[in-house]
Amino acid sequence: MKILVIFLCLLYVLPTNSKRLTPRENKILKANCGRYVEGFISLSGKRKETSEEWKALYGKEVSIGEAPWAVSLTMKKRTLSGERVEDQFVQHGTGTLISPWHIVTAAHLVGITEDPLPNCETGELNDAKFLRDFKDFVAFVNVTCAVPEMCKDLRRGDQFKAFAVESLYIRKGYVGEGCENRESFNDIAVFELKEPIEFSRNIFPVCLPSKAKTPVMGAKGYKLYGYGRDPSDKALESGKLKTLVGTVTECSDEFPYEGVFCTAAENRGLACDGDSGSGVVRTSETRNVEELVGVLSAGASCPELYDAHLLQRKHRRTLTQETDLLIDVSSHLEFFCKCCGICTK
């Protein structure tokens, strides 16, 4: 299928029917994001009568709003001949809900060809193509497993409703993994859904930062939620929803561009395969809401780090600590406003 790409000053747009928020919807979203607001189910402004109580979710006691914005991003399974398999999905990454229509993730989940390469200097795609059809992506919300098959194997009662993707927005300048030292530059994307997600106690969007602000070295409380594979959990191949709490630290490598930062997990853990695109949230310094501050772009190899930790534990050595590379969401506020109508000013 040939995909039409329209070039704008801030983004690549692969659209059908845009679900860009109106100024009124944006105002309602800003007033209700980042925390549970009883009766808030949509951007219509109407409230829903509710008698919801605290619940034990799948046998585990959870607090209100533990990860209501976390999204499992999967792809429709295909046969060797390329035919889609009905109602079967393959884990691919993690995203974060920022409106009823919009999910933030990493652009490398879609990817760009390395032969031919885009222009690594200007960011123009030229003859390069996106590797994956965005319409093959399917989103699941309010689930503790990446795909239905996993929850079935674990005998969990998660209800999986598939949300199809209708449009894709990628920040212009992203050139993929073929351009040396620019793999994570503008590695940010927004999936736009065919139908809106209705909010509830267990599903609501995170806020975007109100202004551009560089993360402070040593700052704590950066919480990553992702469906990545865990090499320490040998019984499972696909991801269960997990969280890592990290601190802003120096990156292992230097990057010739701005708009990225690094965190190190407090338990020396690391985001893994399937965590790509995961949102990192932090409580706002000015109001009692959760804000999306980072999107996971890259990190060290989890299996290699896990094997190193096994050896270090055996010899009672200090465990190696690696860092996760994150896209600074506050550097892309104009992108979200232009593509989706989610404007913080």
Image (cartoon, rainbow, N blue to C red):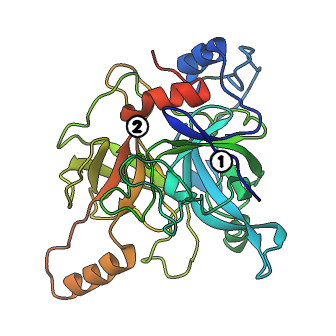
Tag shown at residue 142? 1
Crowding at dot 2, Cα within 10 Å, few <14 / some 14-19 / many 20+, comes out as many
Please identify the quarter of the rendering in which residue 231 is found. Answer: bottom left
Residue nearest the viewer, comparing 107 with 243: 107
Q: Is residue 328 above or below residue 45?
A: below
Q: Residue drawn at (48%, 48%), measured in percent from left and top?
A: 124
Which element is circle 2 on? helix
User: On the rendered structure, is 293 left or right of 278?
Assistant: left
Label 1 vs label 2: CA separation? 23 Å
Query: Does residue 283 appear in this view?
Result: yes
Query: Where does the image place residue 60, in percent across and percent down from the top left?
Result: 57, 55
Query: Where does the image place residue 340, in percent across and percent down from the top left?
Result: 60, 29
Residue nearest the viewer, comparing 130 with 21: 130
Q: Which circle, 1 or 2, is nearer the viewer?
A: 2
Q: Is residue 207 above or below residue 314?
A: above
Find disc 2 in the rendering and name its residue: 329
Along the polypeptide, which appears first: circle 1 or circle 2? 1
Q: Residue drawn at (27%, 51%), measured in percent from left and top?
A: 262
Q: Is residue 140 above or below residue 208?
A: below
Please identify the quarter of the rendering in which residue 281 is found. Answer: top left
User: On the rendered structure, is 309 left or right of 130?
Assistant: left
Query: Does residue 68 appear in this view?
Result: no
